Amino acid sequence: MSRSRASLSLSAEEITSLLTLFPGGVVAVDLETTGLSPLVDKIIEIAAVKLTATGEVTTFHTLINPLIDVPEFTIQFHGLTNGDLLMAPTIKKPLRAFWDFVERHPMIAHNSSFDLGYLIKSCHDFQIEFPPLDIYDSCRYVRAIFKPTATPPKNYKLSTLCEFFQVPFQHHVAIDDTFACLKVTAQSAKMEANHKVALEKSFVFRLSSFYQNDCFNFSERLNGLRDLVQKKELVQIDYRGKNFRGVRAVRPIGLMPLPKGPVLFGECLVTGMNKSFLLKKIKNYAKLEASLWQKATVHD
């Protein structure tokens, strides 16, 4: 089943730019999922584009039956219904086929911690080995390119960057998003002669960092926090981190595995910045009523 409505190809110029960054080739990946928490939500679509060292471009695409109902609030974004996924395979065989497709190429995605988080968690659940590849983030790469300039895009969302670079694509269609990721990376690469620093800043992690089970441990004491995150509720956490100890109000985005351990990723309502809070350092948590937070903010 192909859902794309965009023209999916890479120009010779884009291929040259990408091979300047990744001489051995690269694989871009994008997923659609049942939610925003890799630790608890499920994959429903996998797409990837592989560029080899010789300039060959091939694609991988499959829908996935998550064996759970797809929440209505996510359908409005990706358009995939329970009926669309009913006859699709479950995750195990497509996941093995995906890694066979990737081979030993480094990987890139837009906000790659999320996409790779789902893939890594699914591999962990089914004891599927993955190659020790380097993972890069196209969002970080474009930020690094534009940070010294006076005319950056208004933000670094994939849709905004595609508009900025005049790249046509159908957002939240996984195969379109993979090509868009490569195209905005290629367009950004043309703006910078010295790519080494920007590429280093776009590095996220090496997959071998996730071989330890501690990356996925989710304590039962946090089941209530998981439910609050799934419902997109504001939360108040009592945190005991290295750089901050105290109570913080957070607008949750998702629960993610990272090499240092699973985290709550969300917007800190005190600083307005997105941050990762290690779950093992959250001592207590509670639902935070939006009205009470607004009153406290106005009072302050």
Image (cartoon, rainbow, N blue to C red):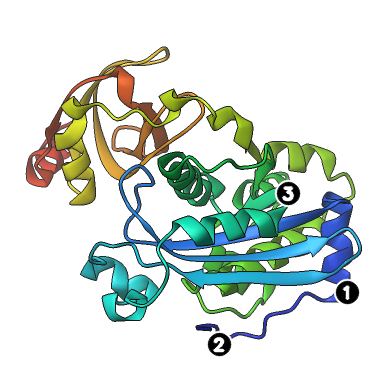
Residue hosting label 1: 12
The front one of 23 and 188 is 23
Residue found 91% across the figure and 63% down from its top: 54
Query: Marks 3 and 1, Cα distance to the nearest angstrom?
Result: 21 Å
Indicate the secondary structure of the residue bearing disc 2.
loop
Q: Is residue 222 left or right of residue 15?
A: left
Query: Height in image: 170 above or below 273?
Result: below
Indicate the secondary structure of the residue bearing disc 1.
helix
Residue hosting label 2: 5
Q: Earlier in the sequence, mark 3 or mark 1?
A: 1
Q: Earlier in the sequence, mark 3 or mark 2?
A: 2
- Going by the numbered disc 2, the residue's amino acid type is Arg
Q: Quadrant of residue 276?
A: top left
Q: Which mark is residue 145?
A: 3
Where is residue 299? Give x, y as percent: 13, 34
The front one of 287 and 212 is 212
- Going by the numbered disc 3, the residue's amino acid type is Ile
Residue 153 is at least partly visible in this image: no
Indicate the secondary structure of the residue bearing disc 3.
helix
